[in-house]
Image: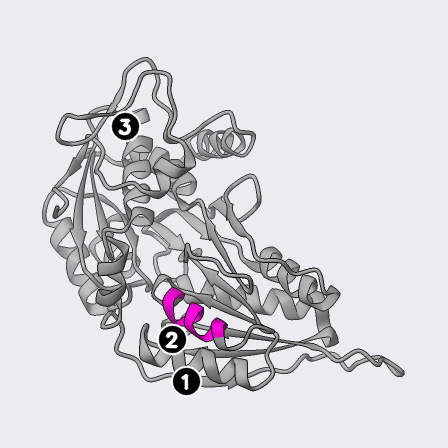
Amino acid sequence: MYKNLAATLVAACFFSPVFSQTTPATVPTKGSAAEPVKAGFVYVSPITEAGWTRQHEEGRKAVEAALGPQVKTTFVENVAEGADAERVIRDLAATGHQIIFTPSFGYMEPTLKVAQDFPGVKFESITGYKQAANVATANARYYEGRYLAGIAAGRMSKTGVAGFVAGFPIPEVLQGINAFTLGMRSVNPQATVKVVWLNVWFDPPKERDAAMALFNQDVDVIAFHTGSTAVMAAAQERGKMAVAYHSDMRKTGPDAQIVAVTHQWGAYYTERVRAVQKGSWKSANVWGGVREGMIRVGDFGTKVPAAVQQEVLKAQKAVGAGQLQPFRAGKAPVRDNEGQERIAPGQALADAQILQMNWLVEGVVGKLAR
C-alpha cells in the first residue's frame, strides 16, 4: 500500500520550489566561538495563513526564538514530492546544513536516498516510517484530536450527518476519519460521516468543490485532511460548521469554525536542533499526541456553548492522562462499516494495529478500494 502510494504522491503537487533563507534577529554575544547550527526545512506547499505547512513554519520560528544566534535556519517552500524534493534536500545537505526536516509523507524516500550520501548530516522524516542511522522519524497522534473534535461535532450537528474531505486513504488519514466518527457517535450513536477522497494533499479549488458537494447532502458540519483553508472558507460561505485542521482558522471561518485540531512542532524541532548542537542527536521514532503537547484541541468558535467546550476540554485531559483512548471498545465491540468486528469489547488497538489501519468504522459512508 505504501509503495504504491509513494509513486502516486510524486504527482500530488504542481508547485515550483521557492527558496528563502532567514537569519536570526539576535546578534551573537561578543567572544562567542560556537558556530550556529544550520537547520533546513522543506515544505510541500506554499506558506499560507493556516494549514499543514504553516504549522511547520511556526515550528521553525519557534526554533529561532528558543536558540537565537545558536541557530541559522533555511526553508524551501512549494517543493513537489519526488525528484524536486530529492534535489532540494540534496542542495541543503551539500551547503552545510547539519539537520534537515522534511515534513511530508512523500519526502520519505528522497530523504533516505540523500541521507545515504551525507552520513554526517541528520535528517528528520516527519510522517515517514523508515529510519536509518542518520534519519529519524516523527509523527503526531492526530487521531486523538480528531476524536475530541468529533465530540464537538456530534454535539453541534443538527442533522447528525458530517462530511470529511480527505487526501489519500493512507493509515494516518483513516485513523482520523475513524476517530472523528467514533467521537461523534460517542455523543450521537446515530451520527454518520460522508467521505470524499481527493487523491491530492493541496488543491484549494478541488477541496472547495468537495466541501460544497457534501453540503448538498445534509452535511451541516465538516472536517478535512487537506493542506489549505478552502474547506473552512466553503463552510463560512454556506453558513455551515467546520472543524479546523493543522491550524486555528477562525480568520477564514469566523462564524463556521467550531473547534480546531492544531499541531505543535516547535518543542520537538527545538529539542532535535539542540541535540545536534550538543552532539547527542540519535535516530529515533517519535509518535506524540496530547500527552506530549504535539496535538491540541481548542480555539472554539463563538457558537459553541460553554458546556460543550468544557466537555471537550475535559475529554482532552483524559486523553492526555491515558484515561481515554479513541480506539478502545466499551461493552460493545467496534465494527467496521462492513460489519466485521475490529475491536473486541473492553479491548484497545495496539500502536502497530493503529499504524496499519486499513478499514472504515461503522458510521462512515463509503468504501475503500481493495
Q: Disc 3 marks which residue?
A: 185
Determine contact: label 3, label 1, CB under 8 Å.
no
Q: Disc 1 marks which residue?
A: 18
Give the mark, 2 or 1, whose residue is nearer the N terminus: 1
Per the image, is 112 magenta?
Answer: yes
Amino acid carrying mark 3 in the image: Arg
At 42% from the left and 42% from the top, the residue drawn is 145
Amino acid carrying mark 2 in the image: Pro
Give the mark, 2 or 3, whose residue is nearer the N terminus: 2
Name the foreground residue: 223 vs 334. 334
Q: Which mark is residue 280?
A: none
Identify the main secondary structure in magenta.
Answer: helix
Determine contact: label 2, label 1, CB under 8 Å.
yes
Q: Is residue 58 left or right of residue 5?
A: right
Residue most extreme to the top: 331
In this rendering, is residue 307 above or below 142? above
At 30% from the left and 47% from the top, the residue drawn is 171
In this rendering, is residue 116 above or below 174? below
In this rendering, is residue 368 above or below 323? below
Q: Residues within 10 Å of mark 2 (few under 14, many from 20)?
A: many
Q: Secondary structure at mark 3?
A: helix
> Where does the image place residue 90, in percent across and percent down from the top left?
46, 81
- Name the image quarter holding residue 146: top left
Q: Residues within 10 Å of mark 1 (few under 14, many from 20)?
A: few
Give the mark, 3 or 1, whose residue is nearer the N terminus: 1
Per the image, is 330 magenta?
Answer: no
Q: Disc 2 marks which residue?
A: 46
Name the foreground residue: 28 vs 39. 39
User: How far apart are labels 2 and 3 at the CA level?
Assistant: 36 Å
Q: Which residues are magenta?
A: 108-116
> Where does the image place residue 166, in percent across and percent down from the top left?
24, 53
